[in-house]
Image (spheres, coloured by chain):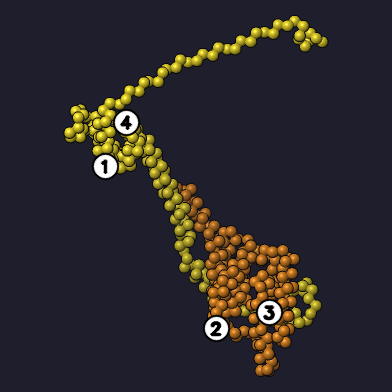
Chain colours: A orange, B yellow
């Protein structure tokens, strides 16, 4: 009986340790997950919902995700997948969040130009193939370098480098065609 | 965007900055609290896991053991009570045969026997008292079996198989080779 109680106590202790580790991961990775979802959905509420869903799933599998790097990579990929699924489901939804915190422009005219450019840039990013899109989004979030993006996506650094080059080239050409 | 991308074009740098600004959004202040609430709303997953480990798996193991042992013992008992059962048929009225015909299991065709077993012959045999004859024939085929019994009141005599004496094989005797000058050692 004592052994049984000891084993139960051990389980509770392990669970408490897991919970504290998960809390730490939640604090340090919530912005990352939210921005990944926002990069796809461009809607705050949807992005928060998707990121929270990803954290709930991560909590379920946290025993296998205790390593920090592994957790962040898993979280990014899960968030991206959930966001893409939500984006495809809501593709026809018209009420997308258009108001983005833009840098303060000097005049109304400059504000209008900046808004147009941001709108076209978002549309150009959205039109990218998925593999290029996730690379450019992750590179823009939290100043991730190529090594970090490769670690998050689980692909070689050379692959990230080539995809990033292609994505930036495609975006530049698309904006150049629009004379923006 | 990091410097080691070897970007030469200022436009690309500007574009990178714009993308970073587009994605420079912060989650709401209660983001982590909402995550905790959603996790707390799903306590069943862990509770269900413990329930399966602690209760259901041992119970299922015991149940499987009981089913396996019960089925095995019943499987051992059932065939022995039926395989050698005799069937006694009363003669049909008006038939020339006077006495009841006792038909052994070998005289009943296999397909009739199997139908009788399928119709619940085992259960019937279990209810009978030890002295009672067991009827393992489908009731719809009773008339046909009666006619079969009437036409063959006695079973044809089958001559017993001739007993075979054991064959005695005597060991093969090979005569020794007696040739004084043919041994290899002698040649050399």
Residue B87 in percent (x, y) is at 27, 32
Whether labels 1 and 2 belong to a single chain: the reply is no
Residue B168 in percent (x, y) is at 51, 13
| Occupied quadrant, residue B159 | top left
Q: Chain of mark 1?
A: B
Q: Label 3 crowding class (10 Å Cα cut-off): few <14, some 14-19, many 20+?
A: many
- Please give the residue where the numbered disc 3 appears in the rendered image: B19
Q: Nearer the viewer, residue A5 or B62?
A: B62
- Front tag of 1 and 2: 1
Residue B62 in percent (x, y) is at 41, 45
- Please give the residue where the numbered disc 4 appears in the rendered image: B107
> Gap in Å between the C-alphas at discs 1 and 2?
77 Å
Q: Is residue B54 left or right of residue A116?
A: left
Residue drawn at x 78%, y 81% is B10
- Secondary structure at badge 4 equals loop
- Front tag of 1 and 3: 1
Residue drawn at x 37%, y 20% is B160
Residue B61 in percent (x, y) is at 43, 46
Q: From the viewer's perspective, is residue A46 above or below residue B101?
A: below
Q: From the viewer's perspective, is residue B166 above or below residue B145?
A: above
> Gap in Å between the C-alphas at discs 3 and 2?
21 Å
């Amino acid at each position: 009986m004592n052994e049984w109680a000891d084993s139960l106590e051990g389980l509770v202790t392990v669970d408490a340790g897991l919970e504290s580790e998960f809390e730490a991961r939640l604090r340090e990775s919530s912005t990352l997950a939210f921005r990944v979802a926002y990069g796809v959905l461009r809607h705050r509420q949807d992005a928060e919902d998707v990121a929270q869903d990803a954290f709930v799933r991560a909590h379920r599998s946290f025993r296998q995700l205790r390593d920090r790097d592994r957790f962040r990579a898993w979280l990014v990929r899960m968030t991206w997948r959930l966001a893409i699924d939500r984006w495809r489901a809501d593709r026809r939804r018209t009420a997308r969040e258009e108001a983005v915190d833009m840098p303060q422009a000097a005049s109304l005219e400059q504000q209008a130009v900046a808004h147009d450019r941001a709108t076209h840039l978002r549309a150009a990013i959205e039109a990218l193939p998925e593999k290029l899109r996730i690379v450019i989004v992750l590179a823009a979030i939290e100043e991730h370098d190529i090594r970090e993006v490769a670690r998050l996506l689980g692909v070689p650094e050379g692959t990230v480098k080539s995809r990033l080059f292609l994505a930036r080239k495609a975006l530049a050409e698309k904006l150049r065609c629009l004379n923006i | 965007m990091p410097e080691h991308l070897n970007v030469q074009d200022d436009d690309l740098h500007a574009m990178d900055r714009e993308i970073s600004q587009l994605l420079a959004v912060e989650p709401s202040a209660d983001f982590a609290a909402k995550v905790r609430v959603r996790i707390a709303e799903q306590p069943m997953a862990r509770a269900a896991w413990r329930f399966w480990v602690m209760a259901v798996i041992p119970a299922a193991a015991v149940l499987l053991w009981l089913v396996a042992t019960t089925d095995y013992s019943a499987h051992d008992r059932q065939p022995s009570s039926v395989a050698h059962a005799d069937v006694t048929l009363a003669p049909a009225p008006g038939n020339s045969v006077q006495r009841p015909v006792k038909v052994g299991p070998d005289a009943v065709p296999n397909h009739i026997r199997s139908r009788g077993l399928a119709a619940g012959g085992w259960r019937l045999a279990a209810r009978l008292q030890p002295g009672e004859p067991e009827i393992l024939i489908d009731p719809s085929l009773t008339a046909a079996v009666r006619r079969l019994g009437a036409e063959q009141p006695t079973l044809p005599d089958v001559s017993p198989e001739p007993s075979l004496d054991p064959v005695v094989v005597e060991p093969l005797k090979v005569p020794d080779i007696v040739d004084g000058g043919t041994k290899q050692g002698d040649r050399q």
